[in-house]
Image (cartoon, rainbow, N blue to C red):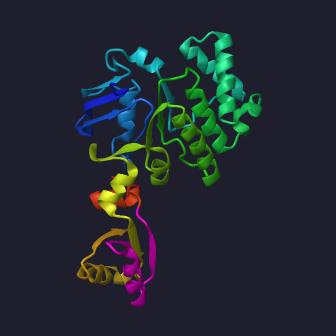
Amino acid sequence: MEPIVQVTDLVKRYGEFTAVNGISFAVEQGECFGILGPNGAGKSSTLRILTAISPASSGSVVIDGLDVAQHPRQVKARLGVVPQEEDLDTDLPVLQNLLVYSRYFRMPPKLALESATEALNFFELGDRADTKVDTLSGGMKRRLVIARAMLNRPKVLVLDEPTTGLDPMGRHLVWERLLELRRQGITTVLSTHNMEEATALCQRLVIIDHGEIIAEGPPTELVRQSAGREVVEVRPQLGEIAAVRGRLMELGLQVERAGTALLAYGSDAIELERQLASEGLQVLYRTANLEDVFLRLTGRSIEEDD
């Protein structure tokens, strides 16, 4: 079976600046695929090309067998798009927001109402149909934006930072619904710099930095390959960071700096934690994650701006 999304040698330039520099990847039918990277890495530029909003400078994107550059209207009809910015109509109640949006797809009124009701119930907003949008919580608004994107029953759902600004409860409610969509076989392309979100939702992902793919694969495999299983965080006094880093490197450890913390990667993190604690250092033993992968590959945090 052909991938439902195929990106080949994609380039996006803005004048002299290259935002996306020849990236290629494929998304399989029913897969949740992640695009990770810091601000300015090229994630949003890539999604704008995928969703036929912005033209590529070169390369190609094919979605459900259609070249995006040649068939933008047909591609848009197959997509559900969740933008990073909240763009709901605050003058209209919840259900009316969806019904007005359905007109972009020329949906018959009966089908639009049926689809809107189904989407609201799925995202646990059925009892809010007549509620004004501006009275909803942040989490409810994000769920409503995703429900709106499902109106046309898309083949591919594209989400740009879907839980930015949400509290932990609101974030987990959105994740729960997105996981259910994945279980139903909906193909999802997710852009995020939230490592916990990517790990929870994505079956496979790429990490982009300076417009180029620097890693690709399942989240757990990327962590295992690049960071190991465990990490020890060491937090020396500010004036002692260089000396402590030197000491860790003398022990044969691979060390990266993240703000005021030093991250030590070793084969026996528990023993390392004991040793460093015995020397009076403040340490924290934890499981390695995607943030460590990015730090190991680039030498900086994924949340740092370019």
> At 73% across and 39% down in the image, what residue appears?
135
Vertical placement of 272 versus 20: above or below? below
Q: Is residue 92 visible?
A: no
Q: Is residue 134 left or right of residue 261?
A: right
> At 64% across and 19% down in the image, what residue appears?
100
Q: Is residue 175 visible?
A: yes
In the foreground, 306 or 275: 275
> At 38% across and 32% down in the image, what residue appears?
28
Vertical placement of 282 versus 299: above or below? below
Q: Residue 108 in the image: x percent, y percent? A: 63, 9
- Tell which residue pokes out farthest to the front in this image: 1
Q: Residue 92 in the image: x percent, y percent? A: 70, 26
Q: Quadrant of residue 184?
A: top right
Start-end of magenta stretch: 260-288
Q: Is residue 286 magenta?
A: yes
Q: Quadrant of residue 64?
A: top left
Q: Is residue 254 magenta?
A: no
Vertical placement of 290 versus 206: above or below? below
Q: Is residue 296 left or right of residue 172?
A: left
Q: Residue 284 in the image: x percent, y percent? A: 46, 75
In the foreground, 296 or 219: 219
Quadrant where the N terminus is found in the figure = top left
Q: Residue 143 in the image: x percent, y percent? A: 62, 37
Q: Quadrant of residue 304?
A: bottom left
